[in-house]
Amino acid sequence: MIHKRWERKLTKSIAGRKTTHLIQGLGKNPMKMTSMKIPAIEVAGTAYENMDFVFADLEYLSTASGFELDGILGFPFLSMGKFSINYRDRRLYLWDDPIEAANGLERLSQLHPPQP
């Protein structure tokens, strides 16, 4: 999900097709959202191709968290490989190789053993 403030800039620079959806949340009225396939995006030095993104107003999350959010990584992205989230250090670790992932998770657990 990408903050809607990026929609105009991205759609001008990418010759992609936008699709509009009506999404019903917990409120009474459905919300209009736009989705688009982005040909390539880089996260933590790794390129990902042909990812689908939805543009949405993330201002309420920015206000609540105190961070300026540009987007949220969701299941389609995270399901592409192995990952670990270190909440204490605010870090996301990504691995392409399952063996590297297992070794990395073992190293992380040694650095931050589970608390009883």
Image (cartoon, rainbow, N blue to C red):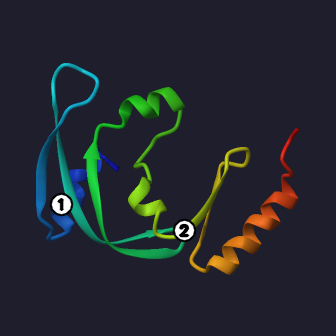
> In the rendered view, does 19 fall on the left or right side of 50?
left
Query: Which of the 4 quarters of the picture holds residue 3?
Result: top left
Dot 2 surroundings within 10 Å: few (below 14), some, or many (20 or more)? few
Q: Real-space Cα distance between discs 2 and 1?
A: 23 Å
In the rendered structure, find residue 111 and report the number of the disc placed on it.
none
Is residue 4 among what the camera can see?
no
Query: Few, some or many C-alpha atoms within 10 Å of disc 1 (few <14, some 14-19, many ≥20)?
Result: some
Q: Position of residue 48 (x, y in %)?
A: 40, 74
- Horizontal side of residue 87 vs 45, given as left or right: right
Residue 11's disc is: 1
Give left or right: position of 28 versus 115: left
Residue 44, numbered label? 2
Q: Secondary structure at mark 1?
A: helix
Residue 34 location in percent, x, y? 17, 49
The picture quadrant where one finds residue 103 is bottom right
- Mark 2 or mark 1: name the one nearer the start of the chain: 1
- In the picture as drawn, the residue positioned furthest to the top comes out as 28
Q: Nearer the viewer, residue 15 or 97?
A: 97
- Vertical comparison of 33 with 95: above or below: above
Residue at the image point whose x is 11% and y is 48% from the top = 20
Q: Quadrant location of residue 82?
A: bottom right
Residue at coordinates 67% horizontally, 72% vertically from top-left? 101
> Would you say residue 33 is visible in this rendering?
yes
Q: Amino acid at mark 2?
A: Ala
**Image location of residue 62, percent across then percent down:** 45, 34
> Is residue 37 depicted above or below 1 in this figure?
below
Q: Seen in the image, is 83 located left or right of residue 34?
A: right
Q: Amino acid at mark 1?
A: Thr
Image quarter hosting the C terminus = top right
